[in-house]
Each structure stands twice: as C-alpha cells, then as structure tokens.
Image: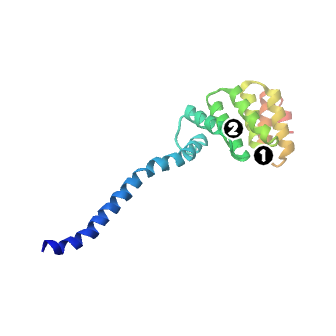
Amino acid sequence: MIPASRPAARPLALLAVTLCALASGMAALPAQAQKTSEPASEQRQCLGEVAAGVDKRIEACSALIGKSGARKDDLIGFYLSRGDAQHEKREFQAAIDDYGQALKLDGEHLRALNRRGLAYAAKGDRERALADFDRAIKAHPKDAASYNNRGSVWRDRGAPDRALA
C-alpha cells in the first residue's frame, strides 16, 4: 500500500511547491504595489481627495512639483492645490507665489487668476487683486465669479457704484 500512495504524493508535493513559490512571489507584491501607488496616494493627498492636514497637503504637493516629468496640467493643479493649502494657513504670500507659478505655465488660467486675486485681497493688496480679477474677466468674460470677486473688492474699498460696473 505504501508504494501505491507514492504516485499520489507526487502531485500533492508538486502542488505544495507551486503554492510555496506563489506565496513567496506574492509576498513581494504588496511592496511593489505600495511603490506604484505611492505617487497616486501623494497626488490624492495633494489634491485634497483624501483626508490630510494642511501641512501634509503642502508636503505632498511640494514632492510632486519637485519630480520631473509631470504634465503641464498636472503641475498647474499641484501649484493650485498647494496655494490653496497655503491660503488656508493664512500664508498669503506663499499662496500668491504658488498661484503665480501656475500662471507662468498658463497666463490665462481662470482659477489661478481668481485665487491669486483672493489671496492679494486677503493680504490687503487690493490693487493687485483688482488687476487679477480684471485679467480674469478679460480672458473669461462669461465667468461670474471673477465679476463677483472684483465687485467685492470695490465694495470693500468703499466704492459700491464701481462694484456694480
């Protein structure tokens, strides 16, 4: 009986060896998957798609900006997101600088113009805020937010009649 069971043991041994090989190969998969998902996770943190504190968002965006090979549109998004995080921290000059970097990549980018204008207004530099809102309106005349932002600055300057223009 023992010799008869040996042929049956061969397929089981082969199956055991195959399973061990697969298991050892799969043990490396989480590390590889983690490496490939790190940029995606970093990008999701930067863009605020996952819960992350302001400093973590800034850190993630900075890392993405520092990497070479990012597409222009992605880079603009990273600068805008980092600028938004800086604005949340009330680091208005840092936010203005980030929005300015986005505008170097696309001089008529609507969100960058409006957000930089808002940062200038928060900093108290209403002239530059108005310049950005005027530039946004010229480039995107149908955008209501730009008119609203400009009107708010004129209202705050005590010129409500200009706010309606």
- Residue at horizontal 71%, vertical 33%? 98
Q: Amino acid at mark 1?
A: Ala
Q: Amino acid at mark 2?
A: Tyr
Q: Would you say residue 9 is visible in this rendering?
A: yes
Q: Position of residue 23 (x, y in %)?
A: 36, 56
Q: Look at the numbered disc 1 and give the secondary structure of its residue.
A: helix
- Residue at horizontal 23%, vertical 69%? 9
Q: Earlier in the sequence, mark 1 or mark 2?
A: 2
Which of the numbered marks, if any, corresponds to residue 160?
none
Q: In front: 57, or 160?
A: 57
Q: In screen coordinates, is 107 left or right of 41?
A: right
> How many residues crowd mark 1 within 10 Å: few (<14), some (14–19), many (20+)?
few
Q: In screen coordinates, is 21 left or right of 129?
A: left
From the image, tell me which residue sits under label 1. Answer: 144
Query: Is 29 drawn above or below residue 79 in the view shown?
Result: below
Q: Would you say residue 158 is visible in this rendering?
A: no
Q: Position of residue 154 (x, y in %)?
A: 81, 31
Q: In screen coordinates, is 6 left or right of 160?
A: left
Q: In front: 96, or 161?
A: 96
Which of the numbered marks, if any, corresponds to residue 79?
2
Q: Position of residue 27 (x, y in %)?
A: 39, 51
Residue 109, quarter of the rendered image: top right
Q: In front: 147, or 17?
A: 17
Q: Position of residue 121 (x, y in %)?
A: 75, 29
Quarter the N terminus occupies: bottom left
Disc 1 versus disc 2: nearer the observer: 2
Residue furthest left as drawn: 1
Quarter the C terminus occupies: top right
